[in-house]
Image (spheres, rainbow, N blue to C red):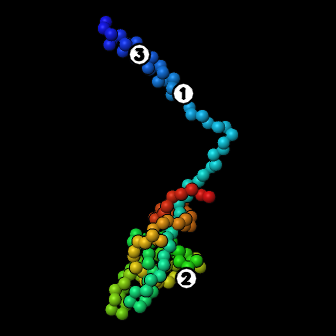
């Protein structure tokens, strides 16, 4: 028996024993530290919008990825987008969003899609029901 086979025969069982013994070792866990119970919830996507004037009319500047079901926050008011479509007004084709506020009032606002630093960040939107899987949402923890 040469030196290499001797050391491999001798060290293999020791390595196996140490590997199985090391699987039972756990990191230190402080029994006094209580991890709070957190629930994962789905929230609507909410973004800020602002108004810009174009063609002499006010337009809401919304993110490029605006979709039905998003919440838009503007002037201490939150509305939910229910539909987007193109219309022609005074010979100019523009995009409009049909939005609905908390009281159920529906209105049509002209929009311009543009990503700005102000409307890129996600805000905590309203909580969606568990059975609503069609609305775009962000999954987060409840507070």
Q: Is residue 96 above or below residue 130?
A: below
Residue 60: quadrant of the picture: bottom left
Residue holding disc 1: 24
Could you say where residue 113 lies in the image, as x and y percent from the top left? 39, 76
- What whole-number distance in Å separates the C-alpha atoms at marks 3 and 1? 21 Å
In the image, 129 versus 25, the foreground residue is 25
The residue sitting at 35% across, 10% down in the picture is: 6
User: Is there CB contact under 8 Å for labels 2 and 1?
Assistant: no
Closer to the N terminus: mark 3 or mark 1? 3
The residue sitting at 36% across, 93% down in the picture is: 90
In the image, 134 versus 120, the foreground residue is 120
In the image, 117 versus 93, the foreground residue is 117
Could you say where residue 137 lies in the image, as x and y percent from the top left? 48, 63
Residue holding disc 2: 105
Of the two numbered discs 3 and 1 in the rendering, the one whose residue sits closer to the viewer: 3
Closer to the N terminus: mark 2 or mark 3? 3
As helix, strand or loop, the secondary structure at mark 2 comes to loop
As helix, strand or loop, the secondary structure at mark 1 comes to loop
The residue sitting at 51% across, 28% down in the picture is: 23
Furthest-right residue in this view: 32
- What whole-number distance in Å separates the C-alpha atoms at marks 2 and 3? 77 Å
- For the question of whether residue 140 can be seen, the reply is yes
- What whole-number distance in Å separates the C-alpha atoms at marks 2 and 1? 62 Å
Q: Is residue 26 left or right of residue 54?
A: right
Furthest-top residue in this view: 1
The residue sitting at 38% across, 81% down in the picture is: 95
Label 3 crowd (10 A; few <14 / some 14-19 / many >=20): few
Residue holding disc 3: 11
Label 1 crowd (10 A; few <14 / some 14-19 / many >=20): few
Of the two numbered discs 2 and 3 in the rendering, the one whose residue sits closer to the viewer: 3
User: Is there CB contact under 8 Å for labels 3 and 1?
Assistant: no
């Amino acid at each position: 028996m040469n030196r290499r086979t001797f050391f491999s025969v001798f060290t293999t069982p020791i390595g196996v024993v140490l590997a199985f013994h090391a699987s039972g070792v756990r990191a230190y866990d402080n029994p006094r530290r209580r991890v709070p119970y957190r629930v994962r919830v789905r929230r609507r996507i909410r973004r800020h919008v602002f108004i810009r004037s174009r063609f002499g009319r006010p337009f809401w500047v919304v993110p490029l990825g605006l979709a039905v079901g998003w919440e838009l926050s503007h002037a201490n008011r939150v509305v939910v987008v229910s539909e987007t479509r193109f219309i022609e007004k005074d010979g100019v084709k523009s995009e409009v969003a049909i939005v609905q506020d908390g009281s159920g009032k529906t209105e049509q606002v002209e929009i311009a899609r543009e990503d700005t630093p102000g409307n890129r960040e996600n805000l905590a939107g309203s909580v969606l029901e568990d059975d609503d899987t069609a609305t775009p949402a962000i999954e987060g923890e409840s507070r």
